Image: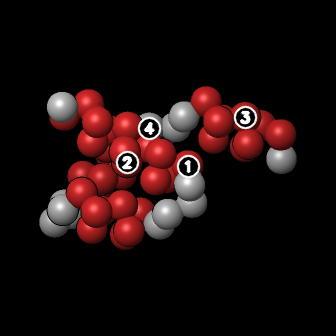
Amino acid sequence: MHGFRHTHASLCFEASLTMQDVKERLGHSSISTTMDIYTHVTNGRKEKVFNN
C-alpha cells in the first residue's frame, strides 16, 4: 500500500502539480520529505525533458 504513495506523488509531479501541492496531498510537514523520498522521475517525464 505504501508504494501507491510513491506512485501518486510521481504522477502528480508528472502532471505538473507543484511540490507544495503534492506535499499537502500527502500530508507532509516538510517539503523536503516530499522531494527527497516521494517523487521519482517517471519515464514520461524523462522523455519530455530529453525532447526539449
Q: Which mark is residue 40?
A: 4
Q: Amino acid at mark 3?
A: Glu
Give the SS element for disc 3.
helix
* Cβ atoms under marks 2 and 4 closer than 8 Å: yes
Residue 36 in view of the camera: yes
Q: Circle 1 is placed at which residue position?
A: 14
In whole angstroms, how far apart are the C-alphas of marks 3 and 1?
11 Å
In whole angstroms, how far apart are the C-alphas of marks 2 and 1?
9 Å
Mark closer to the chain start, 2 or 3: 2
Q: Amino acid at mark 1?
A: Glu
Quarter of the image where the N terminus is located: top left
Mark closer to the chain start, 3 or 4: 4
Give the SS element for disc 2.
helix
Q: Closer to the observer: label 2 or label 4? A: 2
Quadrant of res 37: top left
Quadrant of res 15: bottom right
Q: Position of residue 51 (x, y in %)?
A: 83, 40
Q: Amino acid at mark 4?
A: His
Q: Circle 3 is placed at which residue position?
A: 47
Viewer-closest of 8 and 47:
8
* Residue at (24% x, 52% y) in the render: 33
* Residue at (44% x, 38% y) in the render: 40
* Cβ atoms under marks 3 and 4 closer than 8 Å: no
Would residue 45 appear left or right of 19 to someone viewing this image? right
Q: Circle 2 is placed at which residue position?
A: 9
* Residue at (19% x, 34% y) in the render: 2
In whole angstroms, how far apart are the C-alphas of marks 3 and 4?
14 Å
Mark closer to the chain start, 3 or 1: 1
